[in-house]
Image (cartoon, rainbow, N blue to C red):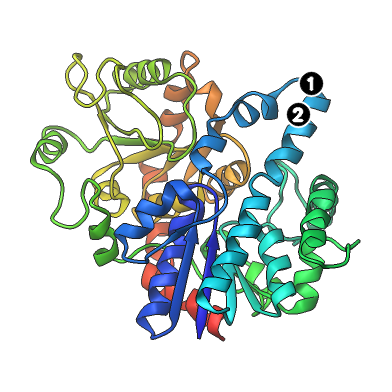
Amino acid sequence: MRHVFALVGSRGDVQPALAVALELRRRGHEVVTGVAPNLVPLAQRLGLGPVPLGTDSAALLGSDLVRRDMRSAHPVRRVRALRAVASAGWDELRTGLLALLDDVGGADTVVTGLLGQEVAAAVAERRGLGMAALHYCPVRANHVVSPVSGLRGPGATRAAWALGERVRWGLTRRAENGQRGALGLAETRVHLPARLRDAGVVEVQAYDPALVPGLADEWGPRRPVTGFLALDDDARARLGEAGSGSGLDADLEGWLDDGDPPVYVGFGSMPVGDPTALLAAIDATCADLGVRALVSAGWNDFTGVDGAGGATQDEKRVRVVGAVDHAAVLPRCRAAVHHGGAGTTGAVLRAGLPAVVGWYSADQPMWGDLLRGAGVGVARRANTLTRPGVLAGALAEVLDDATAVRAAALGARLVPPDRAVAAAADAITG
């Protein structure tokens, strides 16, 4: 079978799906991979021969549309920004995916993540192809996981999901029907979740059932809950990040050995508004709590920030590095502060660490709630972490023995990554 992957968004949206692509190829399937242009080098290092699809996700996340307009206090500006972001890059994704399908002579299945799913579904419908989707958090109506922090009760939870689906459809309906029109398809009045359900599309739930007890039973085999997806050791070694392959570089290894296990701090693809203020807050927190911190810069530029690229002048308690291999580094740490992306959340949980989720948007507050509900984390808005005492107070809540024991126990219960990837591949080919 030939599977064409159409993956847009940040690294957290793309990398888990690449693990599935590699597994399908290992099983003898033909895999064609399209990714966001800025993530082509990542997929190239994995040997997947990617082509660029859609638009540069790093540029979008760093744009005024995301960093300013989506957070505007003016409701009209905020709604316009949400509508624009929801359909950003759809024209480029449509034309790129059509060209890719033409180049390879079609496909049996189009595999996509959550972002751009409307376009992938329309293209698959126009070409008469099968489709499968990977979801990294619950995004369909259910009685188990609330989309709104603090909401309780299955009835209220279901009602909140129904409202959310209507809002999403209101934001994307015009753009989605525009894509359908460009493909020669009729307009639709039915929102995407219902259409995918009626078409029998498999939507793989790529997160762990231990965090959402009862959800797999509610949704059944069309939405299997497989566990968090992650690259295997060989694939991670090909990425060449700190800790992958041959191990940590001697300098970082020496820093880790020269003191207690640190707190890991990393916000992945999320833009840090003020790196200087963040590092100051981290340093002050370390001083207050008597801990060290290993800071991974992610997509942020810490160039020129005091202490970036090495230890701070104050007892070498804060170390700033580039991208790291989570599987190698996190087990050397005692807790984590992160943005609440599904990939990082899964890696932190597998390492058995308690966490502070400094969330920005999308599914991140949900992961913060789920970790809090499991007794292994707390959540704060990311833009509050630089305020005096906020980060220290949040970390103090999770740096206790009872939370550490719960986090270790939960980590031991999670589905191993090889089984999760295999289950996702089974669902796609099933």
Give the farthest residue toward the right. Answer: 189
- Whole-percent x and y of residue 146? 71, 51
Q: Nearer the viewer, residue 11 or 286?
A: 11
User: Which element type, helix, strand or loop, lies under badge 2?
Assistant: helix
- Whole-percent x and y of residue 247? 15, 52
Residue 110: tell me if it is visible.
yes
Which residue is labeled 2 in the image? 78
Q: CA distance from mark 2 to mark 1?
A: 6 Å
Horizontally, is 69 left or right of 164 in the view? Answer: left
- Give the residue displayed 39% in from the left and 86% down from the top: 28
Q: Nearer the viewer, residue 391 or 153?
A: 391
- Give the residue displayed 15% in from the left and 32% down from the top: 259
- Whole-percent x and y of residue 409? 39, 58
Q: Establish if 139 lies above or below 309.
A: below
Q: Are marks 2 and 1 in contact (CB under 8 Å)?
A: yes
Q: Residue 200's image quarter?
A: bottom right
User: Which element type, helix, strand or loop, lies under badge 1?
Assistant: loop
